[in-house]
Amino acid sequence: MQAHPITKYQPVTPIDLPDRQWPSRQIERAPIWASVDLRDGNQALAIPMTVDDKIEFFDSLVQTGFKEIEVGFPSASQTEFDFIRRLIDEKRIPEDVTVQVLVQARAHLIRRTFESLKGIPRAIVHLYNSTSPLQREVTFNKTKEEIKAIAVEGTELIKSLVDTIPETHIRLQYSPESFSDTETDYALEVCQAVMSVWQPTESNKIILNLPATVEIATPNHHADQIEWFCRHLKERNKAIISLHTHNDRGTGTAATELGLLAGADRVEGTLFGNGERTGNLDLVTVALNLYAQGIDPNLDLADIPSLRATYERITRMNVPERHPYAGDLVFTAFSGSHQDAIKKGMDLQAKKASPSSLWRVPYLLIDPQDIGRSYEAIIRINSQSGKGGVAFLLHRHHGLDLPKAMHPEVGEAINRAADKDSRELTTDEIHEIFLCEYVERQTPLKIIEIKSKDFEKSGELHIEAEIIHRDKKEIIGGTGNGPISAFVDALKDCGLKDFQILDYRQHSIGHGSKTEAAAYIQIKKEDGRIYFGCGIDSNIEFAGLNALVSAFNRSR
Ligand code: KIV
Ligand code: ZN
């Protein structure tokens, strides 16, 4: 990197817009969405899509609810041409969907594009040429007037060709490519010239797409460019202003959102942000950001996992683990305090009257279920995880509703195991550790059998139990107001009672013939230390007795 002073790069010139309005606006509705996956996204793939891939991707975009879809660059290659022909010939374009085709402002390419469109009921022809000083000087070596003339002549040719396919309703989209790096007044001048040729009307508007072909500045700068453009455009009512951001600085989403505040009507982008270099705008993120603000995005994103699977299979790209909404780790909390808060929020949410009650779960922006994500992956346990996370998983996956006071102790036992192996634990592993630590503790004390249970005249219960203590079989007996107190009495009788019971609770697990009981006992030893035990059995009495034995054994 260059040392200070940095002369290799320079800041952008701010837009002169002291009375900018966008900072105090709010987005109130979804924009018109236009997917450019099959063109901008496709051209950035190491292995571009085949015609069959494109058909499948197109169908999936239609299902997701896109009404404007850029399907390719038909004059650029035979595959692109064949694809649009298949869409038309096989009547695959639903009546409420308009396809868009990209073409450079060059006569032979425009003519070939029109050939590809024969027989289509409606289409958007997307004309573009690059307008920035950098492109004018370095790539084209042309003056401003010459660059404007390219756009004007391209538009004139398109206009003259409209009548060659009279069965088709053609709309024009014009992009001053590299708008983000173009003098805004010059971009306006070119767009105005295109409009003068095309003569849009309020009912047949032109689409002026203002690309951040390369994202060169902070999102507020982009918003200033868009607001300035919208305010200075003559006959604004005859144009749809469209955004097309890329993500070179990692702020494509923010730039788009601020661009909408600044007055844009339409947004172009791709699913999960595929596209040249750092990608195009991720439409899924912007749409779900709107949803999270209570705005209907007008896209069906209820099954993100399957949309993502189709996308990954066809593009051979991966959605990163922390990608907003769609990444594997987005609905996962590792830190204990986050897990505790999520559990509290989820419990309260579950108690609310309706599934559409206001979502108030800390750390989770939206309900994962709304987009087809499951709760299962929400909490994963590693040595950093808290007590709440473990309890949550044992409850959700294994029906064990541990007493709250038991959570820290169980959490510690599980964290120790995770720490030992330096890795995350699955819910099944957590369950196994719990069973091994609590339910299967059978030394030094084990009940082999309850030999007899008789009620005495006093109404108290007397039990005799065969036990093994320190490898020695014994029959012990005691009396109490229930089996647990009778067993405690029996332990006292043989000198093993060095504790008092502080708490006992139980609940059932499962339903019908498979129902089991889980019992939890908390004991306090004479030295003041506290231990929990748990017993699980189809017989509720055994569950309780085993819970006591578990606590006893854990205290040794
Ligand atoms: O990024 C861009 O400028 C483009 C244009 C062709 C619209 O993709
Ligand atoms: Zn682009």
Image: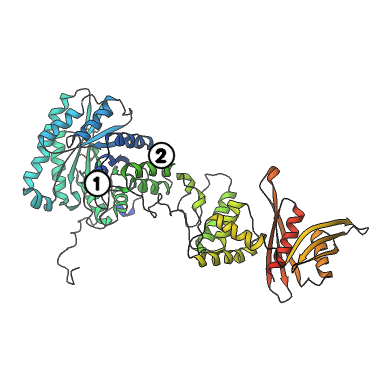
Front one among 15 and 165:
165
Residue 391, numbered label: none
- Percent coordinates x, y for residue 555 in the rendering: 69, 70
- Percent coordinates x, y for residue 519 in the rendering: 71, 57
Quadrant assignment, res 107:
top left
Front one among 509 and 243:
509
Q: Secondary structure at mark 2?
A: loop
Mark 1 or mark 2: whose residue is earlier in sequence: 1
Q: Would residue 244 be found to the left or right of residue 374 on screen?
A: left
Which colour scheme appears in the figure?
rainbow
Position of the N terminus, as image quadrant, is bottom left
From mark 1 to mark 2, how far is it between C-alphas? 25 Å
Q: Secondary structure at mark 1?
A: loop
The amino acid type, in three-letter code, at marker 2 is: Asp
Is 224 above or below relative to 116?
below
* One can see residue 234 in this view: no
Residue 44, numbered label: 1
Pair 1/2: label in front = 1
Q: Would residue 144 be found to the left or right of residue 341 on screen?
A: left
